[in-house]
């Protein structure tokens, strides 16, 4: 159970990031976040 809790938190953060990225898609910010996330 100790392993699943951090996984759930990371998963929810991932969903939140995707939601924010799609919300800013019209500005192309999601591409910047995707690239910067891949580099780091």
Image: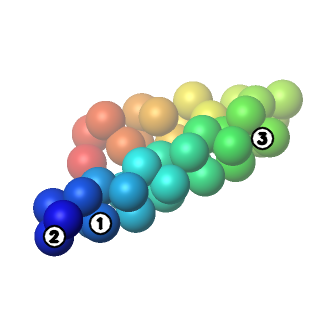
What is the spatial separation of the Cα atoms under label 1 and label 3, in whole angstroms? 29 Å
Residue bearing mark 3: 24
Left or right of 28 in this view: 14: left
Comparing labels 1 and 3, the label whose residue is closer to the camera: 1
In this orientation, does residue 35 appear? yes
Left or right of 23 in this view: 9: left
Vertical comparison of 8 with 25: above or below: below
Category of crowding for the residue at label 2, using alpha-carbon neighbours closer than 10 angstroms: few (below 14), some (14–19), many (at least 20): few
Q: Would you identify the image quadrant in which residue 35 lies?
A: top left
Residue bearing mark 1: 5
Q: Are marks 1 and 3 in contact (CB under 8 Å)?
A: no
Q: Are marks 1 and 2 in contact (CB under 8 Å)?
A: yes
- Identify which residue, 36 or 17, lies in the foreground: 17
Picture coordinates of residue 2, whole percent (x, y) = 16, 70
Category of crowding for the residue at label 1, using alpha-carbon neighbours closer than 10 angstroms: few (below 14), some (14–19), many (at least 20): few
Q: Would you identify the image quadrant in which residue 31 lies?
A: top right
Residue bearing mark 2: 2
- Identify which residue, 4 or 32, lies in the foreground: 4
What is the spatial separation of the Cα atoms under label 3 and label 2, in whole angstroms? 34 Å
Picture coordinates of residue 24, whole percent (x, y) = 77, 40
Residue beneath the point at 38% across and 57% down: 8
In this orientation, does residue 29 appear? no
Pointer 1 or 3: first along the chain: 1
Residue beneath the point at 49% across and 57% down: 13
- Identify which residue, 33 or 15, lies in the foreground: 15
What is the spatial separation of the Cα atoms under label 1 and label 2, in whole angstroms? 6 Å
Vertical comparison of 8 with 39: above or below: below
Picture coordinates of residue 30, whole percent (x, y) = 62, 35
Category of crowding for the residue at label 3, using alpha-carbon neighbours closer than 10 angstroms: few (below 14), some (14–19), many (at least 20): few
């Amino acid at each position: 159970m100790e392993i699943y809790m951090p996984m759930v938190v990371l998963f929810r953060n991932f969903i939140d990031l995707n939601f924010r990225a799609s919300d800013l898609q019209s500005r192309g910010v999601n591409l910047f976040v995707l690239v910067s996330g891949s580099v780091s």
